[in-house]
Amino acid sequence: MQNEERKDLIARVTEILKEAGFIVSSRCEARSFDLAARREEITLLAKILQNIDGISEEVARSIRRAAFCLLASPIVVGVRRGAFFLEDDVIYRRYGIPAINTHTLYDYFVEGVHPYVYSATGGLYVTIDGEVMKGARERKDISLGGIAAELGISRRSVSKYEEGGVSTTIDIALMLQEILDMMLIEPLDFLNPEFEKPLPPDISGAGVEETVSSLERYILSIMEEIGFEIFTTAYAPFNAVSLSQPARPGGEESERVKILTGISRYTERMIKKARIISSLSQVTKTKSVFVVNGNVKRVQIDNTVLIKKEELKKIRDPEEFTCVIEERGKG
């Protein structure tokens, strides 16, 4: 029953995003994000589940990591938080990722209506536009102390509101707006979180996540020797995002090539994953490759190019690697 409800929820999210003009990938069927979507310069990696408390810190970290590498915004779309339904037009957070319900998703992307309220420990909060507040207070010739007395809070708290970027409860904000006769609550732009760049993994073996197998470690070390910067991904359909190194000082500036990189033997499961990362690569404007240990029966699955491990060892640099992908892609 739960699987059917989640399947319906994923279908609803997909429907909303398509109505909003997004290109939407096929379902990833992985523990990490469920789908990717892109509209112009906005790329989303969405985790979709009935109860947003079902996402673990480890999975959230893997989604944030993939989002950083793909210049995407991670979001969680759900129905409940524990036993309680998510409120409409309220932003929740799970391990640094904004979480919303489908109503909020529709309002934001289809109707263009920004949410103003977010949930945090202790209740629901909004952010005051300090500059607007100060201008309105000075025009009405009301002192900080006068505002504080009417609100029943300290003068220092009122001063902090004017300094900007300070949150307060909905009740206080509404009272403040009534006193100053001005809209003071700032809309929330939850698609632009501050990312902390993930450190490249030590793929030599020390401190590597347990999910990285010896085969993956070996292949990724070759990719690194070729000249790619490697970011491993846990629980995603691909094993890593491989980025070509930026041009050296004095050299010509060229756009860094991003490659969704899978590593596996040639199996039915690999074929299924290759189709998924092909769909993801179209949405995220990347290339997709599977490095295969052993024989392969074809050189391409959808838009995902297959390269044998033995072939990879003969490639000298990212440019040659990219040429191989493009040549096989034309076939």
Image (cartoon, rainbow, N blue to C red):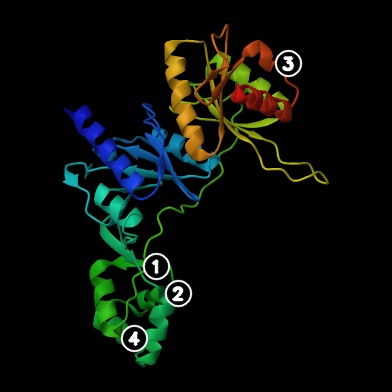
Pointer 3 and pointer 4: residues touching (CB < 8 Å)? no
- Above or below, 52 against 302 in this view is below
> CA separation, marks 4 and 2?
15 Å
Residue at image point 38% right, 91% down:
139
Q: Earlier in the sequence, mark 4 or mark 1?
A: 4
Tag in front: 3 or 2: 3
Residue 217's image quarter? top right
Are there few (<14), some (14-19), or many (20+) residues within 10 Å of tag 4?
some
Are there few (<14), some (14-19), or many (20+) residues within 10 Å of tag 3?
few
Q: Amino acid at mark 4?
A: Gly
Q: Amino acid at mark 1?
A: Val
In the displayed image of the protein, which residue is found farthest to the top? 295
> CA separation, marks 3 and 4?
74 Å
Tag in front: 3 or 4: 3
> CA separation, marks 1 and 2?
8 Å
Pointer 4 and pointer 2: residues touching (CB < 8 Å)? no
Q: Percent from the top left, x then y, of residue 115?
A: 32, 60
Figure quadrant of the C terminus: top right
Query: Which numbered disc covers residue 163?
Result: 2
Which residue position holds label 4?
145
Q: Earlier in the sequence, mark 3 or mark 4?
A: 4
Q: Amino acid at mark 2?
A: Glu
SS for tag 2?
Answer: helix
Are there few (<14), some (14-19), or many (20+) residues within 10 Å of tag 1?
some
Residue at image point 60% right, 25% down:
329
Which residue position holds label 3?
314
Query: Which numbered disc covers residue 166?
Result: 1
> CA separation, marks 3 and 1?
57 Å
